[in-house]
C-alpha cells in the first residue's frame, strides 16, 4: 500500500503564498487562554511553513504553531506570528511494509483514523480526543484508552520539524534520532511540526461492554484491567460511589465492523441528559449527590457490542479539564481525596465528571508517564471558564500535585519549570535540545517561559 490521499493532493496543489490575517484575537476553545498574535498565517503545505518561519526570522518576530486550539492549557496562546496548521491536512504517504503512515500535522485524529480505516488499518496509540490535530496531540503527549499502550507521543515513528530558522528536519528512529525523545513531546517549543508519521496495525474488531460498578472495586481491579483489556475508561460522577466502566477487547480473527449507528445518534440522548444535569446541579448544588444518583440510574449500565473506538467518547460537553497522571499505587488515595473535595464544595463541583484511564510508561523526556505505568485522572467541568470554575480547577490541581501527579500538558495546569524539573528526571535534557533547535528562543511565550525557566 503506497499511496497519496485526495486530501494530500489538495494540499499539494495550494500555492506557496501564505494567507495572512492581522489584528485578530485568538482564543482557545475552552476560553482559558487568549492572545493577540501580530499575524496569523494559515498554512496548507510544508513549503508555506518554511516561508512563514523564514519571514518571521528575518523580521525578528516570535512564532508559534496552533492546531485545533483545543488544549485547555495556555501554551498555544502567544503573541508574535501564529502559524495556524488547521488547513495543513491530509495523508502524505503510506509504507505498508514498515506499517507507518505520514500525515500533514494539521490532520485531526479522527481524519487520520478514518483514512487508515480505508486500508483496513488502525492507528497505534490513537489519542482519545478525535478533534485534536496530530501536531497538537504529539506536542502535548495526548493518550488514548488502550491500557497497555503508551501515549501517542511515545508511539509515533517520527515527525518532520521546521526549525525556527526554517530548516526542515526529519526526526525518526533512523534520522536525527538524538532529537527524538524531546520532539516527541515538545509543547510547541522546538519549532513547527509539519508532518507526523504514525504506526498502524491491521484492523481488528473491538468488542466493548459498559458496566456499572462500585468505584472502589474498579480501583482495586486496575492491575487486572491493565493486564487483560484492550480498552479501558471509567466515567465517574464523583458525588456518588457508582461509576461506568467501558472496557473492550480486540477480537483476533474478526475484521473491524463499523458500527451501524452514527456517533451523533449514539450520543444525542446522553448529551442532552448531561446538559440537564449540569443546569440542575448549578441551580441546586446542595442536591448534587441526588441529581448524580438519578443521572446514574438513567445511564445505560449494561450494554455490549462491537464499536469503533471513535464511537466511545462523550467529552464534548467538558471543555474544561485538568488531568494528572499518577503511579498506579496512588489511585485509591486520589479517588478518596476527590470524594472529599467534591463533598466539601458541592457548588464548585456540581455536575463534575471524573474520567479515569490507564497509560503505559514510556521514555519521552517530558512525559508524565516517563519510566512508569500511570493512572490518568481527569477532572472535567461543564460550562465556561468562570472564576468559580477556575477556582475548582485550581483546587483539583493542588490536590493532584500533593498526591504525586504530573500533568497531561494538554489539560489546564499551572505547573512551572522549577517544579517540573524537580520531579521529571529528563527535564534538563529537554532544555539542551531546545537550545540546539531554537537557540534564539523564537518560540518563547509567557506559558513556555513559566514552564521552561529554571
Ligand atoms: C474535550 C476534550 C477531550 C480531550 N481528550 C483527551 C484525551 O482523551 N486524551 C488526552 O491525552 N488529551 C485529551 N485532550 C487534550 C487534547 O488532546 C490536547 O489538548 C491537544 O493538544 C489538542 O490538540 P490541538 O490540535 O487542539 O492543539 P492546540 O490546542 O492548538 O495546541 C496545543 C499545543 O500544541 C502546540 N502545537 C499544535 N500544533 C503544533 C504543530 N504543528 N507544531 C508544533 N506545535 C504545535 C501548540 O503550540 C500548543 O503548545 C482533550 C481535550 C479536550 C478539550
Image (tube, rainbow, N blue to C red):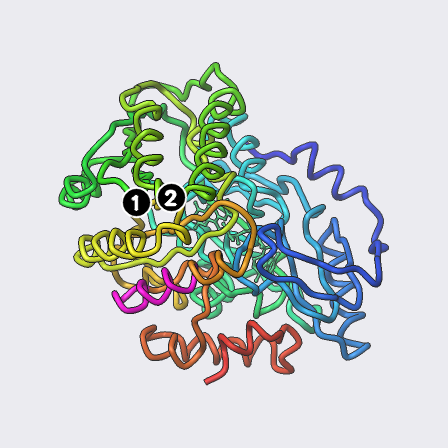
Question: Quadrant of residue 372 in the image?
Answer: bottom left
Q: Is mark 1 within 8 Å of ligand 1?
A: no
Camera-side residue of 92 and 444: 444
Mark 2 neighbour class, 10 Å CA radius: few under 14, some 14 to 19, many 20 or more: many
172 relative to 78, above or below: above
Residue farthest bottom in this picture: 454
Precedes in sequence: disc 1 or disc 2: 1
Can residue 175 be seen here?
Answer: yes
Which residues fall within the magenta stretch? 393-405
377 relative to 396, above or below: above
Camera-side residue of 383 and 107: 383
Camera-side residue of 323 and 229: 323
Residue 18 screen position, x and y as percent? 82, 55
Residue farthest top in this picture: 260
Going by the image, does 5 lie left or right of 410?
Answer: right
Residue 305 screen position, x and y as percent? 33, 18
- In the picture, the disc for residue 14 is none
258 relative to 14, above or below: above
Residue 67 screen position, x and y as percent? 63, 52
**Quadrant placement of the N terminus:** top right
Question: Quadrant of residue 419 in the image?
Answer: bottom left
Q: Confirm whether the magenta stretch covers residue 361.
A: no
Q: Secondary structure at mark 2?
A: strand
Disc 1 target residue: 238
Residue 383 screen position, x and y as percent? 53, 46
Disc 2 target residue: 353
Mark 1 and 2 residues: CB-CB less than 8 Å, in contact? Answer: yes
The overriding secondary structure of the stretch rendered in magenta is: helix
Mark 1 neighbour class, 10 Å CA radius: few under 14, some 14 to 19, many 20 or more: many
270 relative to 128, above or below: above
Can residue 98 be seen here?
Answer: no
Amino acid at each position: 500500500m503506497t499511496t497519496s490521499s485526495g486530501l494530500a493532493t489538495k494540499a499539494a496543489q495550494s500555492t506557496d503564498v501564505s494567507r495572512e490575517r492581522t489584528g485578530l484575537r485568538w482564543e482557545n476553545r475552552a476560553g482559558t487562554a487568549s492572545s493577540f498574535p501580530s499575524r496569523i498565517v494559515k498554512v496548507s503545505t510544508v513549503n508555506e511553513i518554511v516561508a512563514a518561519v523564514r519571514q518571521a526570522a528575518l523580521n525578528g518576530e516570535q512564532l508559534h504553531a496552533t492546531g485545533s486550539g483545543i488544549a485547555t492549557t495556555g501554551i498555544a496562546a502567544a503573541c508574535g506570528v501564529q502559524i495556524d496548521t488547521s488547513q495543513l491536512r491530509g495523508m502524505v504517504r503510506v509504507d505498508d511494509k514498515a506499517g507507518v503512515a505520514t500525515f500533514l500535522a494539521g490532520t485531526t485524529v479522527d481524519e487520520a483514523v478514518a483514512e487508515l480505516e480505508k486500508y483496513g488499518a488502525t492507528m497505534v496509540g490513537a489519542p482519545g480526543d478525535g478533534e485534536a490535530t496530530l501536531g497538537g496531540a504529539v506536542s502535548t503527549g495526548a493518550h488514548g484508552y488502550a491500557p497497555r499502550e503508551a501515549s501517542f507521543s511515545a508511539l509515533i515513528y517520527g515527525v518532520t520539524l521546521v526549525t525556527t530558522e526554517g530548516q526542515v528536519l526529519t526526526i525518526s528512529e533512523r534520522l536525527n534520532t538524538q532529537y527524538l525523545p524531546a520532539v516527541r513531546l515538545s509543547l510547541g517549543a522546538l519549532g513547527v511540526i509539519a508532518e507526523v508519521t504514525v504506526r498502524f496495525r491491521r484492523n481488528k474488531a473491538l468488542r466493548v461492554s459498559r458496566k456499572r460498578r462500585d468505584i472502589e472495586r474498579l480501583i482495586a481491579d486496575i492491575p487486572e484491567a491493565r493486564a487483560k483489556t484492550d480498552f479501558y475508561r471509567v466515567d465517574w460522577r464523583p458525588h456518588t460511589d457508582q461509576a461506568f466502566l467501558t472496557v473492550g477487547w480486540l477480537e483476533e480473527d474478526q475484521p473491524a465492523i463499523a458500527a451501524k449507528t452514527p456517533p451523533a445518534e449514539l450520543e444525542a440522548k446522553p448529551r442532552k441528559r448531561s446538559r440537564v444535569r449540569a443546569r440542575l446541579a448549578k441551580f441546586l448544588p446542595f442536591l448534587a449527590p441526588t441529581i448524580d444518583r438519578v443521572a446514574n440510574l438513567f445511564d445505560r449500565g449494561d450494554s455490549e457490542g462491537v464499536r469503533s473506538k471513535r464511537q466511545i467518547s462523550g467529552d464534548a460537553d467538558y471543555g474544561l479539564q485538568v488531568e494528572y497522571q499518577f503511579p498506579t499505587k496512588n489511585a485509591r488515595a486520589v479517588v478518596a481525596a476527590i470524594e472529599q473535595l467534591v463533598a466539601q464544595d458541592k457548588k464548585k463541583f456540581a455536575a463534575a465528571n471524573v474520567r479515569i484511564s490507564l497509560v503505559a510508561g514510556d521514555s519521552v523526556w517530558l512525559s508524565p508517564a516517563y519510566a512508569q505505568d500511570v493512572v490518568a485522572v481527569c477532572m472535567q467541568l461543564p460550562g465556561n471558564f468562570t472564576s468559580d470554575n477556575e477556582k475548582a480547577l485550581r483546587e483539583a490541581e493542588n490536590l493532584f500535585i500533593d498526591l504525586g501527579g504530573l500533568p497531561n500538558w494538554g489539560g489546564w495546569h499551572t505547573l512551572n519549570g522549577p517544579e517540573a524539573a524537580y520531579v521529571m528526571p529528563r527535564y534538563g535534557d529537554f532544555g539542551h535540545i531546545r537550545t540546539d533547535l531554537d537557540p534564539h528562543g523564537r518560540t518563547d511565550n509567557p506559558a513556555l517561559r513559566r514552564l521552561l525557566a529554571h
